[in-house]
Amino acid sequence: MTGDAVTWRDAPELSPDDPFCATPPGIDALAPGTVVRSRPVDVALFGVVRQRITAWQLLYRTCDLDGAPEVSVTTVLLPWGARGPRPLVSFQCAIDAVAPQCFPSYALRRGASTIGSIAPLELPIIAMALEQGWAVSVPDHEGFGGRFGAAREPGYRALDGIRAALNFAPMALTSTTPVALWGYSGGGLATTWAAELAEEYAPELNIVGAAAGSPVGDPAAAFVRLNGGWFAGFPAAFVAGLRQAYPELGPMLNDHLDERYRGLLGEAEERSTFALLLRFARRDITRHLRGGMGALLAEPVLRRILADIEPGTRAPAAPLLIVQGVYDEVIAVADIDAHVRRYQRAGATVRYLRVRRGSHLPLEFLIVPAILDWLTNRFAALPAPTGTCTVDSVARSPRALRTHFAFVRLVVRMLAGLPIGGGLPERTSLCHSDTEHAHVVDDASIAVRC
């Protein structure tokens, strides 16, 4: 079905005003991942073209970085007409903002105002996962407060969103369902948090692998490096989100920042991701600091927070695929190199793919064939490759080109409102039996062998 005319009555409410998102009494008595309430939703491409994807939203119990109970939302999706069990992918969107209009629970819905949000751009990638016959959970991993950059809690929300999806009867999943994690940029950072915390926080989940593209690596270094450049909106959103998660940060910032920048941080809490980038382009925070950047970074409160938010201190139990652009203009390859080394020293099973061609946003789409292949092998329970590999491109091999053509055809079908996904569990089971093919798939999408 093609998109019907969208009226104001179709527009979803933002989470602060949505009764569905209200916290019920006694939330602390519920087990993490318990579904509090659910509703069917219409998913739409850029809020306009209704998608033939079966979808619900689940409000579930989770916790913040200190373990305090709270609720959050995940959008769970099945291929159109799906029946029976299938693998589950938890896809962490690159929200990279504080404003609720950027949360996937809003931005993926029919009638949403999606201008400036990243989640609608990632919907075709999510649809590619559905095309494999997989189920998908898309959590609001920043929580209702938009706590961008906070430690641990993106992982808690993603893992509890998985628990909620597994416990939601219409999804037809089970406690032994194989689960994979996937995310890029800010979503990649959330993915690594979930991978790190899974063994301790949710050991019952059958997580078979995690694929993280450009997962920030060192948020503190990114803050300093991006300040004053074309992507200075990311540090602004980062600070705005951290002061939501760490109340002690607010008074310290008031001591160092002038009134002008404090007002800009208030704007950052209301602007979409791309609007933030436009508003803060070339904005240098040092022009608004009393004492300069050195004095700010020397503050014990900030040093403790920056140490808390750095990922990579514990080894995920599940295998990891990490992909990073060598010349990425947003995330420095050196930060991801160091992140991978921390995992390797901790004993993690890591496959690290460094790509010379592709800037930050295009690379998210260019690496889709490699990630789909890698996840297919993890669902097939094949041994995960390890080691570091630097390649010129991930888009030139015949297999990768076929997947990219399939992606383009999928976008055309989405624009036409045609059904997404075959809905047959057998599609996934085929790759379990074809082990000879699956064994070589991990590097089949890469233009050169490592």
Image: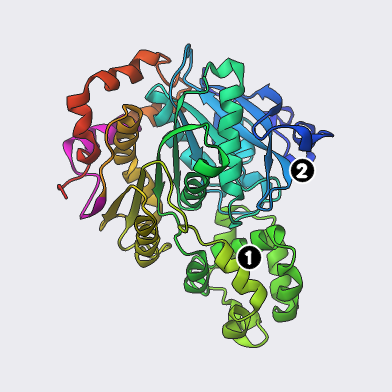
Q: Is residue 398 above or below residue 115?
A: above
Residue 28, image quadrant? top right
Image vertical order of residue 308 relative to residue 287, above or below: above
Q: Position of residue 450 (x, y in %)?
A: 16, 50
Q: Which residues are magenta?
A: 387-407
Query: Which SS class for mark 2?
Result: helix
Q: Mark 1 falls on what kind of element? A: helix
- The question of residue 406 being in magenta is answered with yes
Magenta residue check for 177? no
Dot 2, crowdedness within 10 Å: few (<14), some or many (≥20)? few
Are circles 2 and 1 on residues that touch, CB within 8 Å? no
Name the residue located 70 percent from the left edge and 80 percent from the top edge.
256
x, y (%) of residue 130? 43, 26
Coloration of the structure image? rainbow
Tell me, yes or no, if residue 47 can be seen here: no
Mark closest to the chain's N terminus, 2 or 1: 2
The location of residue 203, given as percent across then percent down, is 52, 36
Name the kind of residue labelled 1 in the image: Val
Would residue 164 appear left or right of 51 to someone viewing this image?
A: right
- Along the viewing direction, whichever of 52 and 137 lies nearer the viewer: 137
Residue type for callout 2 = Pro
Tell me which corner region of the image, top left, top right, bottom left or bottom right, holds residue 370: top left
Picture quadrant of residue 101 = top right
Furthest residue to the right? 25
* Residue found at the far left of this picture: 449
Residue denoted by label 2 = 16
Is residue 36 in view from this perspective? yes
Q: Residue at x 29, y 34 (%)?
A: 373
Check disc 1 and report the residue beneath it.
Answer: 239
Nearer-the-camera pick, 347 or 8: 347
Nearer to me, 348 or 126: 348
Q: Name the residue rendered at 60%, 23% in the picture.
A: 167
